[in-house]
Amino acid sequence: MTRKVVIVGASHGGHQAIIELLNRYDDIDITLFESGDFISFMSCGMELYLENDVTSVHDVRNFRPASFPQANVHILDNHLVTKINQSRQTVSVKNLKSNQDTEVSYDKLILSSGVTPNALAVPGADLENVFLMRGYDWATKIKAKLADDNIKNVTIVGAGYIGIEAAEAAAKAGKQVTLLDVISRPLGTYLDAELTDILSNELATRGVKVHTNIEISEFCGRNGQVEWVKSKQDNFPSDLVIQATGVKANTNWLRGTVDLDERGWIKNDPYLRTNLSNVYALGDATLAYSVAADKKMPIALATVARREARYIVKHLFEKIPTTPFSGVVGSSALSVFSYNFAQSGLNSFTAHRAGINVNSSYYEDNLRPAFIPKDKGNTKAYTKLFFQPFDHRLVGGAVLSKHDITAQGNVLALAIQYRLTLEDLAEADFFFQPGFDRQWSLLNLAAQHALGESEFTNK
């Protein structure tokens, strides 16, 4: 008998669910519904598109419907799932082109409904040239404005990953860029002050004007077009405003049916099941179990959704799942002009928000032996480690350099996932070759420093 699986949402989680279902089962009929008309834009590739570093905007996606030519896979765009009818095990679906409503049955339902970008609830948000930074439509609009010589002043609201990407793309397009944030430093929820101070200087050097602790009260303009951003602290001339102020769960349609928390995140159990029988939830609209924090936290990353999809499908038809979802670390990376950084697990901000007491250690050094001059690639590298005070278990870390050392972020992720300690990292057996690193690698040295050991020197 063919088993029917319905998937809501065509981003990373939905994509991975299709792959896993096809890999694991033969008697499956898969239907994926996507409300948008573009399957499936990869917003994390938007900066590359804006900077002309992609083949085409139509290629900045996870997959196309044609990627799955199998007769048992049905991928439908412009189809909005509006309701789950649990008693009948069906979903109500509206075809946004024909405006026709239908009911589709399922044996298993996977919710990967994702998030939508926040827009500030201030007057003037509907003015022309006040944009959001997410999805295909906004990407193409922003691209056109960055190529428009009439756009001189670009104001970015929000200095997280997306805001930094928007600021860099606008600066490279020759615009006067202002970056605003309500907190005290850019990227402050991702990195500690030692690292954000370096990046703040880099932004200033590149002409990006950073203003922090800003409370925006209004977008102002004349003739229906934005001309400046008004805040309690100052006014900022703006021909284009890009809002990058976080996201909210796309779950209003589930209220009263699926259990949600006070912020709208879907509640799921250790097996990623919702309160409804045969209904699972994954991805950005849920809270993910953090290995580092040992609790659920908001970790909106493509890597999280894909791992959750893999787990759900593996156990989808088990009456009693053999094992709970093991959790994720939460790792990410970003370039900020000439700098590259990667971070994994917790930092001071996220640990405090999770109510976890951690110790930390900051370490900086050259990447390679002292006999190699700076102009031959012996750049500085900066590392911050976070660990449990009682057993030294690693729970977070970040690396930053003008050299691409983001692969070190994967080492940290693996160390956190497998609950290694500072002592483990201090003695981990990494390679040495002076064309790449020191006699002890950067992470060896950072862990030794955190343990209070004498500095290793070869000067």
Image (tube, rainbow, N blue to C red):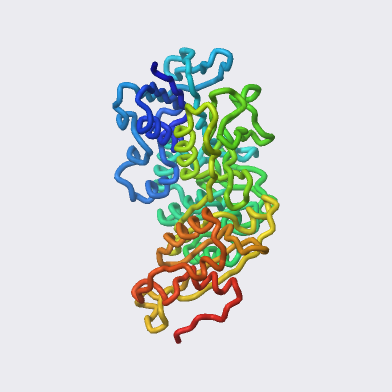
Relative height, residue 86 to residue 149 (above, below): above
What residue is at 41 percent from the left and 37 percent from the top?
Answer: 41
- The percent coordinates of residue 317 (x first, y second) are 47, 27
Pick whichever, 6 or 240, lies toward us: 6
User: Residue 444: horizontal and vertical position, in percent?
Assistant: 49, 70
Q: Is residue 61 above or below residue 432?
A: above
- For the residue pair 449 and 67, the one nearer the viewer reads as 449
Examine the image and state in which quarter residue 451 appears: bottom right
Q: Is residue 352 visible?
A: yes
Please tell me whether residue 432 is drawn above or below residue 262 in the rendered image: below
The residue most toward the bottom is: 459
Q: Position of residue 314 (x, y in %)?
A: 45, 34
Residue positioned 50% across, 64% down in the render: 399
**The N terminus lies in quadrant:** top left
Residue, x 34% and y 49% (percent of image)? 52
**Relative to 19, 101 lies left or right:** right
Q: Quadrant of the C terminus?
A: bottom left
Query: Foreground: 73 or 388?
Result: 388
Residue shown at 49% from the left, 23% from the top? 108
Residue situated in front as seen by the camera: 257 or 172: 257
Tell how many labels. Answer: 0
For residue 261, side relative to residue 404 (left or right):
right
Task: Please state the horizontal and vertical placement of residue 244, each as a whole percent of the image.
Answer: 54, 45
Instruction: Judge left or right: residue 64 versus residue 450.
Output: left
Residue 8 visible: no
